[in-house]
Image: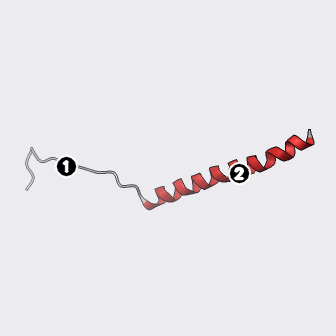
Amino acid sequence: MMTPDTKFAITAVPEPHSYLMLGVGLLAVGAMRRRAKRATPAMANAI
């Protein structure tokens, strides 16, 4: 039974695809850092 004093509590629950996108983003950042780290010594030797 609903009355004017009835209150609703809504909690945010992330969707599974949100976790998937977070994981893909973290992997992409890690891959970019690894690629940059591997390319740096080659550049230093070329100069």
Q: Is residue 28 left or right of residue 15?
A: right
* Kind of residue sitting beneath label 2: Arg
Residue 10 as seen in the image, left or right of residue 42: left
Q: Is residue 35 above or below residue 16?
A: above
Where does the image place residue 29, in percent across and percent down from the top left? Answer: 63, 49
Could you tell me which residue is drawn at 7 percent across and 56 percent down? 1
Comparing 45 with 28, the one in front is: 45
Within 10 Å of the Cα at label 1, are there few (<14), some (14-19), or many (20+) other Cα atoms? Answer: few
- Which x, y percent locates residue 15? 41, 58
Q: Which residue is the site of mark 1?
A: 8
- Residue 41 relative to residue 5: left or right: right
Query: Within 10 Å of the Cα at label 2, are there few (<14), some (14-19), or many (20+) other Cα atoms?
Result: few
Q: Quadrant of the C terminus?
A: top right
Mark 1 residue element: loop
The three-letter code of the residue at mark 1 reads Phe
Most distant residue in the right direction: 46
Which residue is at 44% across, 61% downward? 16
* Number of the front mark, 1 or 2: 2
Location of residue 27 in the rendering, given as x and y in whole percent from the top left corner: 61, 55
Mark nearer the N terminus (1 vs 2): 1
Q: Which mark is residue 34?
A: 2
Q: CA distance from mark 1 to mark 2?
A: 47 Å
Foreground of the two, 27 or 20: 27
Q: In the rendered view, does 1 fall on the left or right side of 24?
A: left
**Residue at the (12%, 48%) spot, across then down:** 6
- Image point (86%, 47%), residue name: 42
